[in-house]
Image: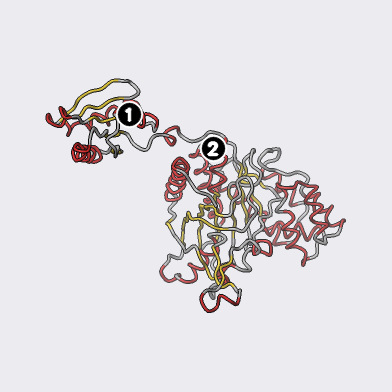
Amino acid sequence: MRDFLPEDVRRRRYVIDIITRVYQRYGFEPLETPAVENLATLVGKYGDEGSKLIYKILKRGEHEKTGEADLALRYDLTVPLARVMAQHQSKLPRLFRRYQIQPVWRADRPARGRFREFYQCDVDLLGSTSPVVEAELCAAVSDVLTELGFNDFVIRLNDRRVLTALLGAAGVDVELHGPALVALDKFDKIGADGVAGELTARGIGSEASETLMSFFNVRVGADSAAHSCDDELDRLGGYIRDEAGRAALENLRTIVGLAGGTRAAGRIRVDPSLARGLSYYTGAIMEIAVPDLAGSIGAGGRYDNLIGMFSRQDIPACGFALGLERVLLVMAERDMFPPELSSSPADVMVALFDASTAPHAMRVADQMRAAGLRVLVYPDAEKLGKQIKYADGRGVPFVALLGDDEIEAGTVTVKDLSAQTQHTYEQAAAGAAILEALRQRG
């Protein structure tokens, strides 16, 4: 859990503004939910390992001595969305398209790009089972990353039903499917040998483990485009015989085809090792990978049964979450932010000659702000050289000077610190003159 200094905040807002603009371009509406949920709402939705990372809130007041918890900080934005849909279904459209950008909390061990408090940038569509939904989500997140300046990302695509079929084809017992998926979800973190060891440690026999690993011997990740999506789907079709698994393969083929008509074309790779650890996924799952980051910068999938846990009817749903912190990390390491985000807090600083000139300084500052400038007033009547040095050190390009002569004449002298020039203007016209100078600088 971190503090964010001004430059950090400007960078975060820059990224969030682009994400918001793209999501709105796709017709998604904003939603916000409380930081705190009932503990019962969250427990059991993320698998055993996820439940261990929930920040629980102890009962309060007379119940505090019990040491029991009844509330928790939200773990993600998807389960709260499901609760909202069940609770407010009559007020929401049948096809509900929402985006949500808020912090979540996990009692995890901090690491590079991993924090205990972090923002997720979710986009979800509820009410349809059509593969058009997955294709649109892939297109939306692809547009976001492209507008942020990424050009080497890959959207890894799989389906939980394909994984189930592969586990069955390998001879993994049904009761061990959950532990096997947890192990497979670590493929990018610990590699093939590590996953094989995890499978053994979780009670999966060596023969079944070896067979399962052989299914993934041709992986299509962020660093490989050796196979087209059709080639990989054909290869997987050679292992899968059950009807649900084959239907899932065709669904993936449809998603890839639909996304081919968007700017996500060429970004998608079918990757059979993609598992996604959250237990509520029921169909297609997706994850965004970039070459120089272990783990993903965004992920999601279809969760058609989750809302039914909170209501009397199942409502199909699919969503995608971009991890703001990881996006920011990669952008900072690659120096992808526009230079102006590191710029000064103001366009002009009004200097203060002495306390008696303060009312005039405030009035001129107000006129300049009304013209559209960012203006700060130096609060202390210190030596002029010290004030100018402060403005220069903060990157403020112009300093407005109001001496006795200017006050008497109704003018203001504007000093350009980079050009080392100065001009005197009527006070009412100074704002427009500075704006024009800024415009010419680009």
Query: Residue tagged by mark 2?
Result: 332
Find residue 388 and name its label.
1
* Residue type, numbered disc 2: Ala
**SS class of the residue under badge 2?**
helix
| Vertical order, 64 against 18 (above or below) | below
- Residue 129 at x, y percent in the picture: 56, 61
* Residue type, numbered disc 1: Ile
N-terminal label among 1 and 2: 2
For residue 106, side relative to residue 81 (left or right): right
Residue 218 sits in quarter: top right
For residue 420, side relative to residue 35 (left or right): left
Residue that sits furthest to the bottom in the current view:
62
- Residue 346 at x, y percent in the picture: 34, 36
For residue 419, side relative to residue 161 (left or right): left
For residue 181, side relative to residue 122 (left or right): right
| The C terminus - image quarter | top left
Question: How far is the residue under mark 1 from the one under mark 2?
Answer: 31 Å
